[in-house]
């Protein structure tokens, strides 16, 4: 498809919907993390959980790269199709490959850290989560605003 055939307002709406779903998932994960930390959870289990999530994202990315299809709802498939048309298939594949490599690299780093003597001090572990939450939202909102 050609980029000019896309209704930009509809794509902006779909990307905002995707952002809302991403925010809901992040808030749910944050609530689960806080509940686990308040009841004396260990950092090993928390980071193991994050590794499993990153592996799922990486597996989905590899599946998408190999097949050109994505698993998910209709609007997610439409947003992906727009992104491929908008930035080009070669550039999109490069970005998706970098995403997969980063997910797997982060798990390698996590496996090499020693969490045995640490505890989950709740106020300290909230700041990176809030930073990633704000960064994700600002990045997505900027990309949505720059669509024209």
Image: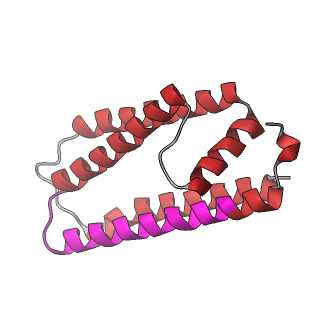
Looking at the image, residue 66 sits to the left or right of residue 4; the answer is left
Q: Position of residue 77 (x, y in %)?
A: 59, 48
Q: Does the magenta stretch include residue 125?
A: no
Q: Does the magenta stretch include residue 15?
A: yes
Q: Residue at x 63, y 44 (%)?
A: 80
Q: Position of residue 123 (x, y in %)?
A: 32, 71
Q: Which residue is drawn at 51% across and 42% down?
A: 70
Q: Which SS type dominates the magenta stretch?
A: helix
Q: Which residue is drawn at 23% across and 40% down?
A: 113
Q: Which of 138 and 29 is in front in this view?
A: 29
* Magenta-highlighted residues: 14-42
Q: Which of 29 and 112 is in front in this view?
A: 29
Q: Which of 16 and 127 is in front in this view?
A: 16
Above or below for 65 versus 44: above
Above or below for 133 versus 86: below
Q: How many dots with numbers?
A: 0
Which quadrant of the rendered structure holds the N terminus?
top right
Above or below for 93 versus 45: above
Looking at the image, residue 92 sits to the left or right of residue 11; the answer is left
Q: Which residue is drawn at 71% across and 45% down?
A: 82
Q: Quadrant of residue 3?
A: top right
Looking at the image, residue 86 sits to the left or right of residue 65; the answer is right
Looking at the image, residue 122 sits to the left or right of residue 73; the answer is left
Q: Where is residue 74 in the image (x, y as percent from the top left)?
A: 58, 54
Q: Quadrant of residue 111?
A: top left
Q: Where is residue 104 in the image (x, y as percent from the top left)?
A: 37, 33
What's the colour scheme?
secondary structure
């Amino acid at each position: 498809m050609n980029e000019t055939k896309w209704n930009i307002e509809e794509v902006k709406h779909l990307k905002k919907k995707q952002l809302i779903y991403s925010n809901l998932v992040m808030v749910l994960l944050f609530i689960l993390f806080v509940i686990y930390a308040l009841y004396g959870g260990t950092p090993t289990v928390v980071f193991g959980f994050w590794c499993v999530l990153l592996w799922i994202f990486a597996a989905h990315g590899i599946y998408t790269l190999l097949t050109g299809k994505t698993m998910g709802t209709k609007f997610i498939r439409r947003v992906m199709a727009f992104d491929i048309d908008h930035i080009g298939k070669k550039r999109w594949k490069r970005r998706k490959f970098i995403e997969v490599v980063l997910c797997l690299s982060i798990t390698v780093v996590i496996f090499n850290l020693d969490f045995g003597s640490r505890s989950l001090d709740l106020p300290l572990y909230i700041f990176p989560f809030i930073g990633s939450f704000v960064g994700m939202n600002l990045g997505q909102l900027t990309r949505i605003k720059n669509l024209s």
